[in-house]
Image (tube, grey):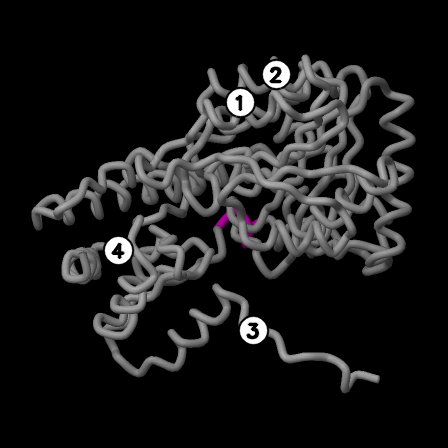
Amino acid sequence: MFETLEALPRDAILGIMALFREDQDPGKIDLSVGVYRDEHGNTPILECVRRGERQMLDAQQTKTYVAIAGNPGFNSGMEAMLFGADHPALRDGRVSTAQTPGGSGGLCVAAHLILRAQPDARVWLSDPSWPNHLPLLKLAGLTLEQYPYYDYENHRIDFDAMLEAFEKLGSGELVLLHGCCHNPCGADLSREQWQALAELFERRGIVPLIDFAYQGLSQGLEEDAFGVRLMAERLPEVVVVASCSKNLGLYRERVGAVSVVLKDSRSAKIALGNTSNVARGIYSMPPDHGAAIVAEILHDDALRMLWVEELREMRDRLNDLRRLLVDKLAERNAPRDFSFIARERGMFSFLGISKEQVVRLREEFHVYMVESSRINVAGVNQSNADTVADAIIAVL
């Protein structure tokens, strides 16, 4: 039976990670992997997570299942964080939320729910988008299309092209938007652009599917939620998938959520029942450990304040590293302008160099990034910034 299977090529990012591990050069630099790293190259456990975990374990009496929809405290805390505690959609009972195994699990559940509601649904992905969006949503059976997003030449959002593409969409079509910290380009929608999209989506009956994996890492928890909250207030239907991997550093704990905003409370209850039914057929019950930690943090004022401060430190460091790399390249009289890196947000940016130049960086200078030239700016630090800048200049 299984002899019919064919060998598959390496995942682009995992393949680069494997090459990095095999490299014996002591000065090698990894700008490929999609996790936050501190000045020492570590991905630390946040102090709020350590304390929240201790509190949770001290109070926990059993390891039995919680619920198909997950941890209730986690779900209510996530709703307040995503939409704002006094959001009209929450007040009106229009939101249904289920805990999922990470953001990927949330996308999977959302995809199957969408397919159940509308078997011929089409979902439009940005060009570019997170590489796993396409295979993940395609595996669920959705029809996928692509819309223009990033102007690779000028390193900005091609918003006019976006609007032109969306004006051609019909009612019930879905558009996947990145809530903030666009992966892989780092170019985020402005408030004015979110408002323009909300007006267009409302007029044409388009449903936003918002992947919100980096809340708090762009401008702040409240500021980053602007687009999500606007869409949930203006539109009758919105799907939001959230992750706690990046902003709480809970990567391996697989902590995520899917929230569906509907036209009324009755529809929201029906959606939650169907969401739970979909989850039951995929993984049955979500893991509780990470979600229970998050619930502890979100419902404890002291822990939440500590988290907000730790999150601010991560956000400020990312922005500082962006400016550091831009300055180092400018000091070396780079033959092109890299100032766009400082304007972008989150962990990622495109350098805008060719695949051949990316290969040279890896083979000649032991600086690793994916072939698209996407870099994780958290891989830059005070110790290696000069080396990174020298290597980039050398291949231009």
Label 4 or label 2, whichever lies nearer to me, is 2
Q: Is label 2 in contact with label 1 (beta carbons under 8 Å)?
A: yes
Quadrant in which the N terminus appears? bottom right
Indicate which disc, 3 or 4, sits on the residue closer to the N terminus: 3
Q: Which residue is mark 2?
A: 200
Bin the neighbour count of mark 1 within 10 Å (Cα to Cα): few under 14, some 14-19, many 20 and up: some
Determine whether label 3 and label 4 are within 8 Å by CB: no
* Left or right, residue 305 beside residue 367: right
- Residue 222 location (% of width, % of height): 52, 25
Q: Is tag 1's residue or tag 3's residue first in the polypeptide sequence?
A: 3
The reply to whether residue 383 is in sight is no
Q: Quadrant of residue 39 in the image? A: bottom left
Quadrant of the drawing holding the C terminus? bottom left
Q: Label 2 amino acid?
A: Leu
Disc 3 versus disc 2: distance between alpha carbons? 40 Å
Residue for badge 1: 163
Q: Is residue 333 magenta?
A: no
Q: Which of the numbered marks, if any, corresponds to residue 9?
A: 3
Image position of 279 with respect to 94: above or below: below
Q: Upstream in the sequence, badge 4 or badge 1?
A: 1
